[in-house]
Image: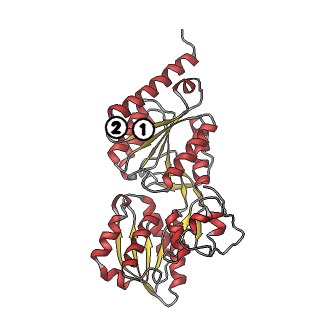
Amino acid sequence: MLNRSVIYKKITLMLISALLCSFILGGCGSAVVTEHTDTAASDADKTGPSIGIVFDSFVIERWERDRDIFTSTAKELGANVIVGNANGDVNEQISIIDHMIENHVDLLVIVAVDGKTLTESVEKAHKAGIKVISYDRIVNNADTDLYITFDNGEVGRFMAEVINDALPDGGKYMKVNGSSTDYNVTLVNEGFDKTINDDITLIDEKDCADWNDEEAYDYLTAHPEDISDADAFMCGNDSIAGQVVRVLSEQRRAGDVTVTGQDADLEACQRIVEGTQAMTVYKPIEDLAGQAAKIAVEMANGSGPDTDKTISDGAYDVPYISIEPIKVTADNIDDTVIAGGFHMKDDVYLYAGDVSKNDDASSDTSD
């Protein structure tokens, strides 16, 4: 009879072989599936759990950071991590999840393309005895074993506070949201709507399907009246904010209109010090991805999650962990994204010169 280590080694090698075949032969269409391990030989000797994490895409700048921190942390804790990239296609994401279930990963982590379409995938995983974590975006009506994210309501409140401060005598604003299928958009808007002053009125609202920021540019150039009437823009993320600033620049209004965003992308931070974007939201990804990886390994090993908080996914109250985001403006950018090592000071001030609020901030802080 084969001992357990031999059996595990064979199963692991079969998993790696299946993944490689899937990638080479296109078994998951255009999806990218890569295993973050050293070599097949070293992987075969490992005894830790296998964790599959499936991303929406890597179009948004921050997701690559999430991937790298999550995989490195989980690997340090002895886990084997398989990364899937759905390239923004929900069918590809379902296919990758199915593939991981068939290969018996111990736990699944999902960054949903569309949380409303993955209920059956989660049910299939649960039937196979695999726990599921909703990462940053909740999978609706699915009873996942954990939802871990930043406080999206707080993100919306931050945006509204900046617009309130910029328009103390009232004014008009426009919303340019991300994907309507992303439940985080709903949560951000709820926080925003509860906070925005009553004398600041909404002109119009535009959703960008699949977080395609070019839709913001196309819409606003087709509706110049919205640009000319708006005193402020509430933008779904920094990429969308960049397109809004682009249109404002073409109308020579950049810097005169309050533009908000989130994610602390480098270009957004550059716009903040230049004065064309009012704020962004810094999300300490090290905290989110690192904590998620630790919890994922614990859950894959049969324990956790350790939280008393729950949140509704639409049908079930699921265990919930939220990480506090940080509002970033020109006044505190040196003390947040730069001091925290998220961006280098020289990169942030590349086009603005050294006009930092904190002369002691290090210029050689690395990513």
For the question of whether residue 190 can be seen, the reply is yes
Residue 339 appears in which quarter of the rendering?
A: bottom right
Chosen colour scheme: secondary structure
Residue 89: x and y in percent read 34, 48
Identify the residue at image location x=39%, y=73%.
Answer: 246
**Residue under numbered circle 1:** 33
Q: Single out the residue that lies furthest toward the right.
A: 360
The answer to which of 71 and 362 lies nearer the viewer is: 362
Residue 272: x percent and y percent? 53, 73
Q: Quadrant of the N terminus?
A: top right
Name the amino acid, label 2: Cys
Q: What label sits on residue 28 in the rendered view?
A: 2
Is 36 above or below relative to 89?
above
Task: Sort mark 2 into few (<14), some (14-19) or many (20+) by Cα contacts within 10 Å.
Answer: many
- Give the image location of residue 101, x and y in percent: 43, 34
How far apart are the two marked residues, 2 and 1, measured between alpha carbons?
8 Å
